Amino acid sequence: MNLEKIGKFIANCRKEQKLTQEELAEKLGITYKAVSKWECGKGLPDASIMIELCKILKITVNDLLSGEKVDREDYQKKLEQNIIDTIDYTDKKVSEKNKSIATMVMFAGLGLTFIAFTIFPSESSRGSIYSIIGLFISTFGFVNIKSGKTILKKIFLGICYFMIGFILLLLLDYSNVILNKVAPRFSYLIETNDTMIIYKAPFYNVYRINRNTKNEYYIIDSKKEYTEKTVPITPFDRDKSGIENIIQFKNKYIGNNSNISHLIDNLPLSEYGYVFEIDSENLELTIDYHVTDWYINENHYLEKSLLYNSVSIFALIDNVEQITFNFSGNTYVVSRKQINELYPNFKDIVDNGINQNNFNKYLESKMNDNNFVESTFNKIFAN
């Protein structure tokens, strides 16, 4: 079926009847743009107005569909061909419409999945539920974009599309966990205890430690090498205060103000605000914290912080000899000699520079032992 030929034929017949596009449209009860569309070869008149159109133009439907006036001897042959062409044209238009709808459904599903990832927080189950629903909707649209496929082929393509989409969702979720330090959306099991939440995802685990506190931090266990009993736990924000981060501030000299500032800023107690002063001549460091010591001492937090900060500073700054910690309540003074003699395994921590494994073993993990903290603190800061 030649739409351009039919369009020119309609235009010629309209002019023969001395009608404008607007006048013809008014007689048919349609807009002139529809008439213009036919005459440009971009579509056919609807079947509901085709007979009326032919009456106005004084032609037959067979003439219209042929794009010319049909001779009597060719009438039957043209009629049969036009019937076949019309059926093909109708099937094609239906197929195109179904394809458009299926495409819209596919992208609507993808949009729902994107919105689910954007709106809902990672620890909310709604994010994963709605993203899966969106993926199902998108899969349904995808398998129906092209007509003519068998049921088995649709099922196969649908499974492949859904699996690829689900894998991409898992990778996107994992990237979000790594970059933003959040809980995974697609965790199949969540375990909660007094100190942490464990999210078990298909290919990795996430430990949320010190949950809902200032010092909350996440450990992403991609190798699944930890358990609830072996995962590194500290009362501090490990991402900031852990040796893996603060080792970058290792320095030989106390006089480097910028380096000292960065180190203190990443150690516990910095969250309460502070100022510091360096005595380069006597190799002393004074830190004034903007908080009262007893106010922050729940669960020995003060003692743990002072021990951790003292060992960290003496380990990372080679020539500092004394540290004074001032609070609005009390003052605590500690020397390198006291740490060397009274803190167990300090020499193992600083052996050949900084031994990170020993740092975690003899300092970080020891902060979970209240008896150790109390007895060691009293030995060091009572002298």
Image: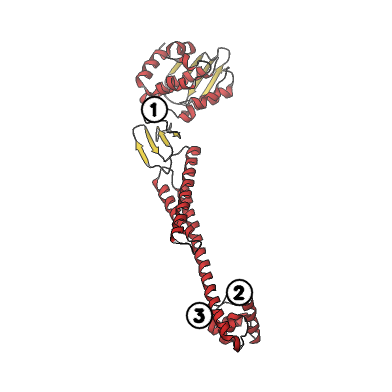
Q: Which mark is residue 52?
A: none
Quickly name the residue at label 1: 230
- Cα–Cα span, label 2 and label 1: 74 Å
Lower sequence index among marks 3 and 1: 3
Quadrant where the C terminus is found in the figure: top left
Residue type beneath disc 1: Thr
Whole-percent x, y for residue 111 in the image: 49, 54
Residue 28 vertical position relative to residue 367 in the rendered view, above or below: below
Whole-percent x, y for residue 194 in the image: 34, 32
Task: Depth check: give the residue in front, 362 or 163.
Answer: 163
Quadrant where the N terminus is found in the figure: bottom right
Indicate the secondary structure of the residue bearing disc 1.
Answer: loop
Q: Is residue 283 visible?
A: yes
Task: Depth check: give the residue in front, 244 or 41.
Answer: 41
Quickly name the residue at label 2: 37
Instruction: Give left or right: position of 263 versus 219.
Output: right
Quickly name the residue at label 3: 48
Residue type beneath disc 3: Ser
How many marks do you count on the picture? 3
Q: Is residue 306 visible?
A: no
Lower sequence index among marks 2 and 3: 2
Q: Residue at x 49, y 37 (%)?
A: 178
Residue 351 vertical position relative to residue 142 in the rendered view, above or below: above
